[in-house]
Amino acid sequence: MSVRPLFLVMLMRRPVVDPAAVVAHRAFLDALRAEGVLERSGPFADKSGGAYLIHADDLAAAQAIVARDPASTSGGWDITIHEWQAL
């Protein structure tokens, strides 16, 4: 059985973040979890941002998922995506 690649999505807060976008982002993550796409997620202890780990077929598919995230569409975070070859 083939395992889909993992992608680490890192979000760094910008100076102004809309609280409504935070609520919508969390709901988005809940939906990904329910779909079996989201592996793990959480904020950084220093409140500078957070990260989540998703399964996707390739980088383009991961980018398409992240593009739907309210954290991305709201502009409140700087976001990077990395394919992660975790052991």
Image: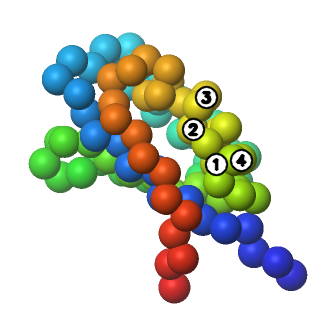
Q: Earlier in the sequence, mark 4 or mark 2?
A: 4
Mark 4 in CB contact with mark 2 (< 8 angstroms) = no
- Disc 4 to disc 1: CB gap under 8 Å: yes
Residue drawn at point x = 27 percent, y = 20 percent:
17
In depth, the one of 1 and 84 nearer the eye is 84
Within 10 Å of disc 2 (Cα), the crowding (few <14, some 14-19, many 20+) is: some
The residue indicated by pointer 3 is 68
Residue at (39% x, 21% y) in the render: 75
73 vs 63, left or right, is: left
Residue corresponding to mark 2 = 66
- Disc 1 residue type (three-letter): Ala
Q: CA distance from mark 4 to mark 3?
A: 11 Å
Q: Viewer-nearest of labels 4 and 3? A: 4
Question: Distance of mark 3 from mark 2, alpha carbons?
Answer: 5 Å
C-alpha span from label 4 to label 1: 4 Å
Q: Which element type, helix, strand or loop, lies under badge 3? A: loop
Most distant residue in the front direction: 60
Is residue 37 in view from this perspective? no
Residue 31 position (above or below residue 10):
above
Q: Tag 4, which secondary structure?
A: helix
Q: Which amino acid type is shown beneath numbered disc 4?
A: Ala
Q: Position of residue 31 (x, y in %)?
A: 64, 37
Residue 61 is tagged as 4
Locate residue 7: give its quadrant: bottom right
> Is residue 22 shown above or below 37?
above
Please report contact status of discs 3 and 2: CB closer than 8 Å, yes or no.
yes
| Mark 1 lies on residue | 62
